[in-house]
Image (cartoon, rainbow, N blue to C red):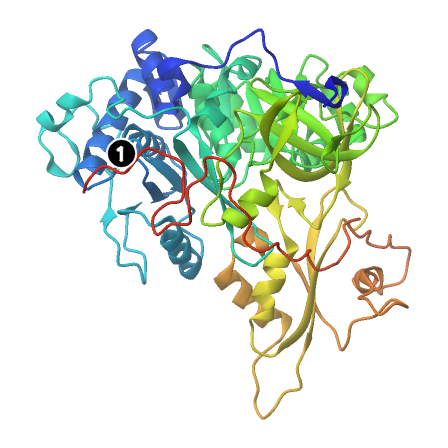
Amino acid sequence: MSARAETDGPRAQAPAAGERALIHGAVAHWARRTPHAPALITPAGITDYARLHRAATHCAAGLRAHGVGPGDLVPVLLPRTEALVPVLLGVLQCGAGYAALDPRWPAPRLSGLLEALNPPLYVARTDLAGVRRPRWSPPEDPCATAGGPGPEGLPGGVLEGLPDGIPVAVTPDAPASVFFTSGTTGTPKGVISPHRATTRLAPSASAWTGPGRVMAQTAPTPWDAYSLEVWTPLISGGASALAPGDHLMPGRLRALVRESAVDTVFLTTALFNLFMDEDPGALTGLRTLLTGGERMSVRHVRRCRAAHPELEIVNCYGPVESCVFATTQPVGPAELDLPQGVPLGTAVSGTRLHVLRGDEPAAPGETGEICVSGDGLAHGYLDDPWLTAERFPTLRIDGADTRLYRTGDRGALDHDGALHFRGREDRQVKIAGHRVEPQEIEETVRGFPGVAQCAVLTTDDGGSALRLALFYTTEPRKGGGTDTSPAALRHALAAALPAYLVPPLISRQKSFPLTPNGKTDTRALLARLTDPAPGPHPAPRPHPAPLTDPAPRPAAPAPYPGAAAPRTGPAVPAAPRSPR
């Protein structure tokens, strides 16, 4: 493959090695090097690295006493507070990986995810309905009790074997986290991400975090942006400031800058645009703004630069399958003047970019599928070797077999090696930073009694943020029938899916309009959302992704090299489980 068809991340700074190639190992490193430096900052106070490390070690002791060991994938259903961080580190110290789940998700969804993870236990404050697995409840405030006896009454001697916070020998390839994303089949996809996928970011992350820097933590825990906001500071010697509440609004960001000395924040593209529309001054005091998730709006960035000329603005891109970021692009006046828009940028450390047409490289400037290789790649999808083999193929690149991830995004590399976005090959969209497969919502709606047809589309209503719109038809009612009103469907969806997958626009139709070739006319459907009141109204613009059924899945391809065979336990390439 020609070198022109690919670009590499920085090589001058080597990826983390030794204990620092493990997330918990890097935290232990900083606990020894700068024990009294701030690690976590909350309105209640500051937790330094030494106390955080001791708290994690206490949690690891409790988890190990209840059978958690290498190869396990442990669901953690705790709210987004400072108490969560030492629990996650404790799981990692056991040699296991974690799946941070929102305890407010519908119980059927949570119980289904727990079954998929097949854990020895789950971590939560209360029992989950319908789940018979053991539950472990951590201390209410692990950091506050880190200097006392072990958790749940364990004697202090239990901790003697864990002085360095790395009690189990695991490699950087060991699973560290599982991120569940929207799936086209109606079932969430579990992306198994190893330690190296996070720690490989350390060289690039030095541009926005490190000793003396403070990053805001605002992302939901199941999202890989949580890893960005917690782990990249903590593996780099910086601090993470936890914002209270579920939504970061201008006033709350101002408080974080004022009270917690936050100097770096990540905002999804839609949220950044909202800040610029409503309150550009809210970014005052920041040094670095990271933003991504959707195509960057030049108009909003110009407004930001006018208000904050010294602020470093970085456009970020990356699928969860290549944890957090694959590319970054500092944005200055020159990038805003490019006719093709602001680039996605160049590869981050430990990462390689490829633009392919089929399995062959595209020429510079030629559009193809964006593919990613390197240390950021996930092992694959939990319990889905077919999809793993399809999305993570091994191709011959520069004379070597290279495993890569096919993103489904279309892009082009310019002559300087910068990546430019050209759209999607399928229906996947980003809503407020969340990756959404409309098919997952459609599959759920089709399971509701009385629904005949349904289609989930996206509209921006002439504004800057995409919104989901659900259209459906109903079967003829017999007798009393089932309530199929939009309100009833909204209630049923809220009981089955996370809030970000519940369309804010729900419209019942007598029938679906068709194109001349007999397909659903998505433009005509979206036009039915327009306000019939007098006066000019911009017609909603459909997302360019076509409304088509996904291609049939090939029958049982061989898994990628090194993948575990289909399993009854966690299907991940990791060290064997310790006996329980």
Question: 20 above or below 316?
Answer: above
The residue indicated by pointer 1 is 141
Quadrant for the N terminus, please: top right
Identify the secondary structure beneath mark 1: loop
Q: Answer yes or no: is residue 537 visible.
A: yes
Judge left or right: residue 184 versus residue 244: right
Q: Residue at x 88, y 26 (%)?
A: 339
Estimate the x, y position of residue 549 in percent, counting from the top left.
70, 60
Q: Residue at x 34, y 8 (%)?
A: 34
Spot the residue most to the front.
Answer: 399
Which quadrant of the rendered structure holds the C terminus? top left
Q: Quadrant of residue 422?
A: top right
Q: Position of residue 162 (x, y in %)?
A: 20, 22
Report x, y in % for residue 369: 73, 36
Nearer-the-camera pick, 58 or 350: 350
Q: Residues within 10 Å of mark 1 (few under 14, many from 20)?
A: some
Q: Residue furthest bottom?
A: 479
Question: In the drawing, does residue 150 fall left or right of residue 353?
Answer: left
Mark 1 belongs to which amino acid?
Asp
Q: How many marks?
A: 1
Residue positioned 51% across, 10% down in the render? 14
Name the residue located 61 percent from the left edge and 40 percent from the top edge.
433
Q: Nearer the viewer, residue 532 or 237?
A: 237
Left or right of 250: which side holds 300? Answer: right
Q: Is residue 519 above or below residue 262?
A: below
